[in-house]
Amino acid sequence: MSTPHVLLGLLAGGSRHGYELKRAHDERLPRARPLAFGQVYATLGRLERDGLVAAAGQDRASGPDRTAYELTGDGRSALDEWLSAVETPMPYVASTLFTKVVVALLVADIDRARSYLVAQRAAHTARLRELTSVKTDPAASVSDVIAADFAIAHLDADLRWLHTTLDRVADWYREVHP
């Protein structure tokens, strides 16, 4: 996720201060990792330094001064460019799931690899059930449903890989231990 671009996108609807941006992020991207306040303010500082946002005033509502930020013309251009760019599919497998299985097989621990695959399949299946219930919840927002759809698609791909890998490991084991 590109935190600077997400913040630019949130500012496209009008000026906001850091607390509002953090809250809007967590509401609009409900299944994403929540942003820390420090991350929001540090990112706003870099965006302001780079001329992509500008201070739009301060308000004091029963606490310290809060600076609101707004998108600049350069910020809108940067956001439009980012939204128009097609993402390159990931060239490398970067998954702890994949890595653990490969390492278990490298150390010739077939039982550990199989046990891990079975346990991981159970964990993925349980998470799939949780996400499916989100989609059928009448109180779920559109953001909740599309986030659940995204996660379900990835879990489904992982489950297919887990199933295929369990079959391959079993076949390999039978070949090595006739």
Image (tube, rainbow, N blue to C red):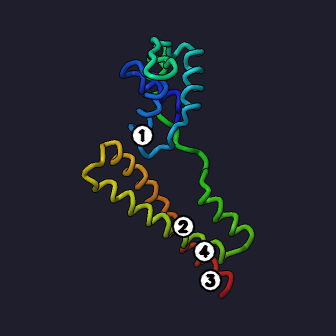
Q: Residue at x 44, y 17 (%)?
A: 76
Tags 1 and 2 touching, CB below 8 Å: no
Give the residue at the far bottom of this rendering: 178
- Using the rendered view, name the quadrant where residue 44 is placed: top right
**Position of 111 compared to 135: left or right?**
right
Query: Residue 125, image x and y in percent?
Result: 44, 66
Q: Residues within 10 Å of mark 1 (few under 14, many from 20)?
A: some
The quarter of the rendered structure image containing the C terminus is: bottom right
Name the disc covering residue 29, or none: 1
- Of helix, strand and loop, which one carries label 1? loop
**Dot 3 or dot 1, earlier in sequence:** 1
Tags 2 and 4 touching, CB below 8 Å: no
Q: Residue at x 43, y 34 (%)?
A: 23
Q: Nearer the viewer, residue 36 or 148?
A: 36
**Position of 141 compared to 164: left or right?**
left
- Of helix, strand and loop, which one carries label 4? helix
Name the disc covering residue 174, or none: 3
Q: Residue at x 61, y 48 (%)?
A: 92
Q: Nearer the viewer, residue 134 or 88?
A: 134
- Of helix, strand and loop, which one carries label 3? helix
Q: CA distance from mark 4 to mark 3?
A: 13 Å
**Dot 1 or dot 2, earlier in sequence:** 1
**Dot 4 or dot 3, earlier in sequence:** 4
